[in-house]
Image (cartoon, rainbow, N blue to C red):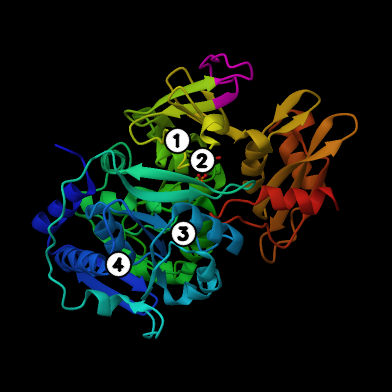
Amino acid sequence: MSLSLRLIYDRARQQFPHQRIIAQAPDGLHRLTYAQWADRTAQLAHGLAALGLQPGARVATLAWNHHRHLELYFAAALMGATYHTLNPRLPAAQLRYILGHARDQILLVDADLLPLVEPLLPALPDLRTVVLMGGAPHDSYHDYERLIADQPTTYPWPTLDESAPAGICYTSGTTGDPKGVAFSHRGLYLHAMMLCMADHFAIRARDVLMPIVPMFHVNAWGFPFAALMAGAGLVLPGKFTPQSLAQLAESERVTIAPGVPTVWAAFLPLLQSGAYDLAALKQIPCGGAAVSAALAQAYEERGIRIAHAYGLTEGGPVTHICTLTAAEEALPVAERAERLTRQGRPAPGIEQRLVGPTGADLPWDGVSPGELWIRGPWVAERYLDDPRTAESFVDGWYRTGDVATIEPDGTMRIVDRLKDLVKSGGEWISSVALENALLGAPGVAEAAVIATPHPRWEERPLALVVRRPGDPTPDEGALQAYLRERFPSFWVPDQIRFVESIPKGPTGKIDKRLLRTTWISA
Ligand code: AMP
């Protein structure tokens, strides 16, 4: 029996036909049942077949989180084709590279995102057809709703090979061209089951899940699949603001809402204002960047667990989840929050290694830092048609490029990206640890730490800090004193600069490359 998205689709349709999907699409709020979503998915498959889509071919999407995007995930994958999500925050040159490299034949695009790709179309010989989702009909492009209207609501799905690629996402590397990663049916299925595990995110049919992580970035971390597998309500928030998220969370009684730390930091003032009734919200799966103790504590104090996870595109993506023991659950809130900053144990099926600069395995003693290597049923084994595979994949292991320490019980803590570590006087300083500590200092809204060249020490850390609006409290001396209480003195940045904002890359992480070019040449 092959494990595939088909099993998730059939079960959702048969066993939870009345469960709801609420989608904030560019053309308004849509409410549908699983049964209607399943019907529309089959209709879309007929529409795609009519456009000439064959098994093995690729369909690209450039879209926010909404029901049509989810219909395409399943229609393409269940037909034996592959969906390929594009990140609208990528520069045009990268979008063109990715669309060309993946040889996408059909593109489904939200009407408001069309201007991003329209100028690229003449340079893409494989791309035959563009389908507009949710906008006014257009002479040059197909219209999604017309494409699926009047099509049959069942489809003769082919038998699927579980190792076939259901979806593709390119990693938005900060240097060089993006690299493609395929997600197999089997990998997505097992990953969804893993997300549902009680000690992970405990997703149940009675839950209402609102993936804030974008469907254009590693399948919204697989949460739409997990929701459909569990039979949970699903809220797809479209292009959102903190206010629109709060409104949806309140009106739909959302219980679980996965998102990156920066989104939840921006959401915090709304939560604290008490303007919305968010009593149903119990859990925030949070990852993609490190969770600070300050963030975890602020939510913990309001009864919302920040469930910290680690992953990466090549990881499928989630590989590690931070869970607390019964004894840890009983700790005072500040200590509990501190425990939640660990990236956690590998999920069942995921194996990890800690590898030193000579290639030797390092001890799992909680203090030795080394590069994290991983492998497992949903971890990639190669990049798509890319010679750089050999640099990153070794004997079935993926070299993450992240520096970590591992406790004897397997609990992993990320120290830094290899390339973001500050090397000062022959010692490593973790930019991530400094940032997390700064986020706990009074009056600090955002913080980033980068290495700057130094004639004597090779590199020294420079901290950039955004003050909380209207709070002039933090100054350089106070923050340095704050850090001195927590770290060896050589870790404390010699300079702390106050800035209006910190630039973020296409997946919402701090853009350290841009910070380096701005601040090091300055
Ligand atoms: P991406 O492939 O774009 O999703 O980025 C993956 C990278 O994000 C990882 O290699 C880590 O550097 C970083 N990352 C993801 N989750 C975490 C986390 N929980 N803590 C720290 N860094 C993280």
For discs 2 and 1, the disc positioned in front in the rendered view: 2
Residue 134, horizontal then vertical, whole percent: 36, 78
For discs 2 and 4, the disc positioned in front in the rendered view: 2
Q: Are marks 2 and 1 in contact (CB under 8 Å)?
A: yes
Which circle's residue, 2 or 3, is located before the other in the chain? 3
Residue tagged 4? 67
User: 295 or 378: nearer the eye?
Assistant: 378
For discs 3 and 4, the disc positioned in front in the rendered view: 3
Mark 4 → mark 1, Cα distance in angstroms: 31 Å
Residue tagged 1? 382
Residue tagged 3? 86
Mark 2 → mark 4, Cα distance in angstroms: 32 Å
Dot 4 amino acid type: His
Dot 2 amino acid type: Asp
Mark 2 → mark 3, Cα distance in angstroms: 18 Å
Mark 1 secondary-structure assignment? loop
